Image (tube, rainbow, N blue to C red):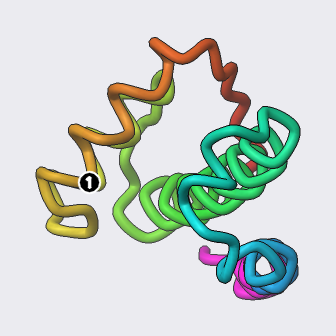
Amino acid sequence: MTDWEVIEQHVQNMEEALAQLKKYQNIPYEDFKRDLGLIWIVEKGLEILVQHLLDIGAHILSSKLKERLGGLWEIISKLGKHGIFPQSFQSRLRAWPDSGISWSMNI
């Protein structure tokens, strides 16, 4: 059974992360790319958003679709299989581990 309170909490956390990221939306790109601290802040905010999105997807897969879940990439693949993520989004997510980001699922 889908626990909508779990999903709602993830959505609230995503809204908080978006609110934080909006603080940086008007910084000129040239200034942004020269400020490593700012890059890390924005990268972390994006990581938080994607993490919550994947947690929601994993929750739906396991509760509604009765999918057995393995690792992160299996979750992304199954979300794509069910049309929840477009292929282009899957490709972008797959590129992130090359940047050293570690993932954990909080279903």
Choose top left, top right, bottom left or bottom right for residue 77.
top left
At 43% from the left edge and 70% from the top edge, which residue is drawn?
64
At 12% from the left edge and 51% from the top edge, which residue is drawn?
87
How would you rate the neighbour count of disc 1 (Cα within 10 Å): few for under 14, some for 14-19, many for 20 or more? few
Of 63 and 85, the residue lying toward us: 85
The relative height of residue 67 versus residue 100 in the rendered view (above or below) is below
In the displayed structure image, the side of residue 27 where residue 91 appears, left or right: left
Q: Position of residue 93 (x, y in %)?
A: 38, 39
Q: Is residue 10 visible?
A: no
In the displayed structure image, the side of residue 56 where residue 97 appears, left or right: left
In the displayed structure image, the side of residue 26 where residue 90 appears, left or right: left
Choose top left, top right, bottom left or bottom right for residue 16.
bottom right
Where does the N terminus fall, quadrant-wise? bottom right
Question: Which residue is tagged 1?
Answer: 89
At 60% from the left edge and 69% from the top edge, which residue is drawn?
28
Q: Magenta residues, as a range? A: 1-14
Main secondary structure type of the part rendered in magenta: helix
Which kind of residue does numbered mark 1 sit on?
Phe
Q: Position of residue 88 (x, y in %)?
A: 15, 52
The relative height of residue 96 versus residue 43 in the rendered view (above or below) is above
Of 37 and 60, the residue lying toward us: 37
Q: Is residue 3 magenta?
A: yes
